[in-house]
Each structure stands twice: as structure tokens, then as C-alpha cells.
Image: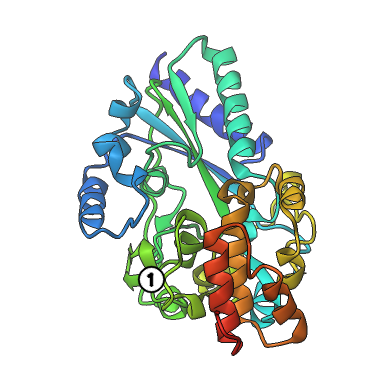
């Protein structure tokens, strides 16, 4: 294909992407040499905690052509997820009887939604150019997605390490297509954080230890999702009622006043998870958990870890007969992980662990 044809194809890809529900699309090369050094240093400090997958693929995460041979371009996409009509996040977090769930997880699992639409985009490209080399990703492989999205012009890496967009804040998912098509490149994003420290100052556990550097071991999203073992006792009181993920740094960011509500029905609130009590969630048996969380990102942490997180929330909740009864009902839970956190929560309410 000549340069004019490739330029036209890039324009078509962006148009097709908009038709498929993507909020923005950009095209980057594969040079992540600067990001590679920063990633290595982050790993060397142990900030990835128990996320062994962040290190086990070596440099494939920062060298796309080593992960998918033949890759010379990355098509980076954004898909907005902020659900309409969700209860105000701050109101939920300020009510200790409620359970706060990160807004990206209130609807269906984004992995399937993005992957299907990325595949549809590749199908459209294939119909135009014939067979071509590609592979689609959405938080599913060793991909340095924020660095690639920044190179593709979708925004810039904020001080909380999430991607920020002047048009959409940070309430969106990212996805990628690695391809061998020599598409024209988009200009990289420019940083607009300035002197703002809102995300750093609001972090409940002070996990953002410096601008653009997060110690995941202190991050509530890591503690409630990625960590499979006991949550360190010293951090439990700081988690409050956040039972799956944490949005504080996004809620504090002034750029999120431009956040876009999702146009994707799959990301709308399901099962009232935007405004539900800790006691009600703790009363779900495993069958109910599996039924209601089927098709949700939450399903993947499993029932015991879900109860572990809610137990911490109940330990931080205002004392009441309902809270005590809910915890006592699981004092002898079959899971040692759940029992440990239930006993801790009861102790927080002045009830002996014995």
C-alpha cells in the first residue's frame, strides 16, 4: 500500500472504531525504550507485590515485536465505562454501611466487551486490505498499555499512573491491536498535570509514593483484587468500605469533570451494586455470588476473596446489631482466609476473637 492508501486506511480505522463504540483511537510505533527502564526500576523495587506476571515475561511487555513477531504498529483504543444513573461515589464511600465497588466493575466484564469489538475492527480492516498480521489485547497479556496509549496520542500518564485525557478524564478502558501494517503515526500525548497533587493527597493508603510512581502493595485495588492472601492488618482500617477496587484518585482528579458517560449498555449498573449494603452482600451464599457475578470482572476474584473484602468493610462499618450478627454468622466459615478477617472485624467492634 502506498502512503496515501495507508493514510486513508488509518482514517477509516478511526471512523470504524467510533462506530464500534470506541471513544478514541490512535496509532503508535513500538519503541518503548524509555518506559522499559522505568518499568525495570519499578519491578526492582518490588512495587508489583504478588503480581508475578508483571515480571515473568521479561522484556516482552516493553517490546511488542518480541511478544508478537512482525509487529511494527500498535492501534490503541479507548472505551468509556462510567455508567449513567449510578449512585454518587462519594456518597456511598461516606456511608459506612454501604459497599463501594469501583465504577468500572458495576457492569459486565470489560475484557470480553473490548476484545469482541477489537476483533470486529480487525475484521473490517481485513475486509479492506486482505489478510494481515495482528493480535488484539485488553489487559490480557504483557502489554504496557498506558505507555502505548500515550504514544498514540490518547492522552498522558497522570501522576496516579493512569492515562488521562483532556476530553474524557480517566473513566475508560484501554485496548490494543498489534499489527504489521505500516500505518502513519499519531502525535504523542502531552502532559497536563502541572503542579496538581490531588490524586497523591487523597490516596487513602498513600500508595502513590511519588508523582508517576505507585507502590501497588499499598494500593486498595491491589489489596482487594490482586492480593490473594491476607490483607496486612495495618492497611485494613484504611480500606474503609471499598470492597472491590478504589476510585479515589480518579474522583479527586480535576480532569475527570470531563469524564464521558458510557454509551455501552454492558457497562451499565447490574444488581444494584452501585448502592448496596455490606450486610446484604455478606449474606450472599456462593451460589448467589456466582449467579449475580456471572459475566462480571468481580467473578474472577472468587467467593472467599469477596467475603474477605466485605469482612474488612464490616470491620470498618459503624457498629450495629446487624453488622455484629452478619459477622458472627461467618465466625466459623469454612475458609481460613474468611475466618481470619471476620475475627479481626469482630475485634474491631469489641468482640473477642476467641
Q: Is residue 171 in view?
A: no
| Residue 322 falls in image quadrant | bottom right
Image: 158 above or below 199 = above
Horizontal side of residue 274 vs 60, given as left or right: right
- Up-down relation of residue 115 to residue 262 (above or below): above
Q: Secondary structure at mark 1?
A: loop
Foreground pick, 338 / 63:
338
What is the crowding at mark 1: few (fewer than 14 residues within 10 Å), some, or many (at least 20)?
Answer: some
Q: Is residue 300 left or right of residue 202?
A: right
Query: What residue is rendered at 38% in x and 39% in y?
Result: 143
Q: Quadrant of residue 279?
A: bottom right
According to the picture, the residue beneath numbered tag 1 turns out to be 207
The residue positioned 48% from the left and 42% from the top of the image is 139
Q: How many marks?
A: 1
Q: Is residue 142 above or below residue 280?
A: above
Quadrant into which the C terminus falls: bottom right
Residue drawn at x 60%, y 50% as measured from the top left: 302
**What scheme was used to colour the molecule?**
rainbow
Q: Is residue 126 left or right of residue 303?
A: left
Using the image as rendered, state which of residue 84 and residue 278 is in the foreground.
Answer: 278
- Asked whether the viewer can see residue 57, the reply is yes
**Height in image: 34 above or below 118?**
below
Residue 94 place in picture, x, y as percent: 65, 82
In this view, the residue farthest toward the front is 354
The quadrant of the picture occupied by the N terminus is top left
Left/right placement of residue 77 relative to residue 331 reads left
Q: Position of residue 92 (x, y in %)?
A: 69, 75
Residue 74: x and y, percent? Answer: 40, 33
Q: Farthest residue in the top direction?
A: 130
Which of 165 and 311 lies nearest the eye of the viewer?
311
Counting from the top left corner in percent of width and height, residue 307 is at 62, 62
Amino acid at each position: 500500500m502506498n502512503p496515501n492508501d495507508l493514510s486513508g486506511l488509518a482514517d477509516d480505522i478511526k471512523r470504524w472504531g467510533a462506530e464500534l463504540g470506541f471513544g478514541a483511537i490512535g496509532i503508535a510505533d513500538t519503541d518503548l525504550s524509555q518506559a522499559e527502564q522505568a518499568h525495570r526500576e519499578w519491578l526492582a523495587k518490588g512495587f508489583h507485590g504478588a503480581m508475578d506476571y508483571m515480571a515473568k515475561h521479561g522484556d516482552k511487555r516493553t517490546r511488542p515485536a518480541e511478544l508478537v513477531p512482525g509487529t511494527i504498529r500498535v492501534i490503541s483504543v479507548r472505551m468509556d465505562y462510567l455508567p449513567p444513573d449510578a449512585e454518587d461515589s462519594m456518597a456511598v464511600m461516606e456511608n459506612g454501611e454501604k459497599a463501594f465497588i469501583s465504577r468500572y466493575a458495576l457492569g459486565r466484564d470489560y475484557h470480553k466487551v473490548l476484545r469482541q469489538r477489537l476483533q470486529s475492527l480487525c475484521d473490517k480492516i481485513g475486509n479492506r486490505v486482505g489478510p494481515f498480521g495482528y493480535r488484539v489485547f485488553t489487559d490480557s497479556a504483557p502489554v504496557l498499555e498506558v505507555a502505548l496509549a500515550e504514544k498514540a496520542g490518547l492522552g498522558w500518564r497522570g501522576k496516579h499512573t493512569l492515562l488521562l485525557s483532556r476530553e474524557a478524564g480517566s473513566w475508560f478502558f484501554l485496548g490494543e491491536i498489534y499489527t504489521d501494517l505500516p500505518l502513519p503515526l499519531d502525535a504523542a500525548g502531552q502532559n497536563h498535570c502541572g503542579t496538581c497533587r490531588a490524586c497523591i493527597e487523597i490516596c487513602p493508603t498513600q500508595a502513590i509514593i511519588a508523582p508517576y510512581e505507585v507502590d501497588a502493595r499499598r494500593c486498595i485495588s491491589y489489596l482487594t483484587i490482586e492480593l490473594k492472601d491476607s490483607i496486612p492488618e495495618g492497611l485494613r482500617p484504611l480500606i474503609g468500605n471499598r470492597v472491590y477496587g478504589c476510585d479515589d484518585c480518579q474522583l479527586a482528579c480535576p480532569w475527570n469533570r470531563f469524564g464521558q458517560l458510557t454509551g455501552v449498555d454492558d457497562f451499565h449498573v447490574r444488581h444494584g451494586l452501585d448502592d448496596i449494603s455490606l450486610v446484604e452482600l455478606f449474606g450472599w451464599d456462593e451460589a448467589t455470588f456466582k449467579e449475580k457475578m456471572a459475566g462480571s470482572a468481580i467473578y474472577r476474584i472468587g467467593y472467599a476473596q469477596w467475603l474477605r473484602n466485605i469482612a474488612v468493610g464490616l470491620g470498618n462499618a459503624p457498629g450495629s446489631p446487624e453488622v455484629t450478627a452478619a459477622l458472627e454468622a461467618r465466625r466459623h466459615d469454612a475458609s481460613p482466609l474468611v475466618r481470619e478477617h471476620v475475627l479481626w472485624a469482630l475485634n474491631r467492634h469489641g468482640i473477642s476473637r476467641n
